[in-house]
Image (tube, helix red, strand yellow):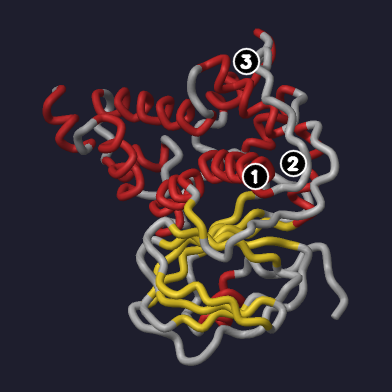
Amino acid sequence: MTQSSVGDSYDGAVIGDRFRLARPATILARTASIAPIGFTRLKSDRAPPGRTMDVPAENAYLFHVQLRPVEVDMWINGKCRSATTTVPGSTFLFDLSSNPIAEIRSSFDNIRFYVSQASLDEFAFDQGIRGITGLASSRIAFQDRVMWGLANALLDSVEHANERSTLFIDHVALTFCAHVVKAYGNAAVPHETASGGLSPWQLRRVLDFISAHLHDDHSIAELAHECGLSSGYFSRAFRQTTGETPHQWVMRRKIERARQLLLGNGLGLADIALVCGFVDQSHFTRVFTKLEGDSPGRWRRRHY
């Protein structure tokens, strides 16, 4: 079978078919220009019948991070590799050129990370890394605390995929790429040097841009473009300059604007949510409560 550089393995319908699930929730980060990086939650309260479907050969990789124990055996290139029973946090790395097939004998719940070789190449070039020709692990299942942390960080976003969280998803994707290239790549990764941060004009330009378009759902690539930087460099430089990720900075600005509106002209919560760039009142309430420790309604009553 001819191996393609980019396939459809991040598509929720295709993933669902392979695991005999209804279309599972999938979110995509487009930090790479060639193919998105995909995150999917695969969950079932019962074991699927038989083995999962064949996987067309593709120059890409999967990480499955288990959120609860699972009993599974794997077939890689037609050869059985027993994984028996795993524990929460167990991580699998699969090369999609090797037709990984699973026989799952229990309920399961995991976060699936998809990244193409093309996306890894683009990320590595941006970081000044040469010679990344694949990802590999010596074990079929292993513990990876970073992947476990990323999987848990993604849970809320995957379950609320309709909500605007592009900056957060992009940040996770860049962190994921940096980790897997360093931990599972086959090239020497240079020691990370501290960036000089954003210059005053770059910081002013990107903050003015965000403030003028606070209701929009920007990507890191769009913000980086305002500064004439790559996504990876911009993300690091922004955090060094402000002490926050772009997503954290934007969320704080939105909540500050929401507080002003809550104390001001009597707008309803649904209207404030839309003015501040949230999908709906539920999304606004969840973010506001997380950052302020109280719901918007109670906060308004306490401060009137």
Question: In the image, which is nearer the foreground, mark 3 or mark 1?
Answer: 1
Viewport quadrant of the C terminus: top left
Hey, what amino acid is under mark 2?
A: Phe
Who comes first in sequence, dot 1 or dot 2?
2
Which residue is at a point 50% across and 84% down the rendered structure image? 20
Residue lying farthest to the right in this orientation: 2
Viewport quadrant of the N terminus: bottom right
- Near mark 3 (Cα within 10 A), the count class, few <14, some 14-19 or many ≥20, is some
Vertical order, 39 against 182 (above or below): below
Q: Which mark is residue 123?
A: 2
Q: Position of residue 220 (x, y in %)?
A: 63, 36
Who comes first in sequence, dot 3 or dot 1?
1
Q: Which mark is residue 177?
A: 1
Which residue is at a point 62% across and 25% down the rendered structure image? 236
Q: Which mark is residue 203?
A: 3
Task: Using residue 139 as the reference point, say whether residue 257 is left or right of it.
Answer: left
Q: Position of residue 125 (x, y in %)?
A: 82, 38
- Near mark 2 (Cα within 10 A), the count class, few <14, some 14-19 or many ≥20, is many
Who comes first in sequence, dot 3 or dot 2?
2
Residue 240 in which image quadrant: top right
| Cα–Cα gap, marks 3 and 2 | 23 Å
| Cα–Cα gap, marks 1 and 2 | 7 Å
| Cα–Cα gap, marks 3 and 1 | 25 Å
Q: Are marks 1 and 2 in contact (CB under 8 Å)?
A: yes
Front residue (pair 72, 238):
72
Task: Using residue 31 as the reference point, say whether residue 303 is left or right of it.
Answer: left
Front residue (pair 108, 183):
183
Which element carries disc 2, helix, strand or loop?
Answer: helix
Residue 209 in which image quadrant: top right
Which element carries disc 1, helix, strand or loop?
Answer: helix
Hey, what amino acid is under mark 3?
A: Leu
Hey, what amino acid is under mark 1?
A: Cys
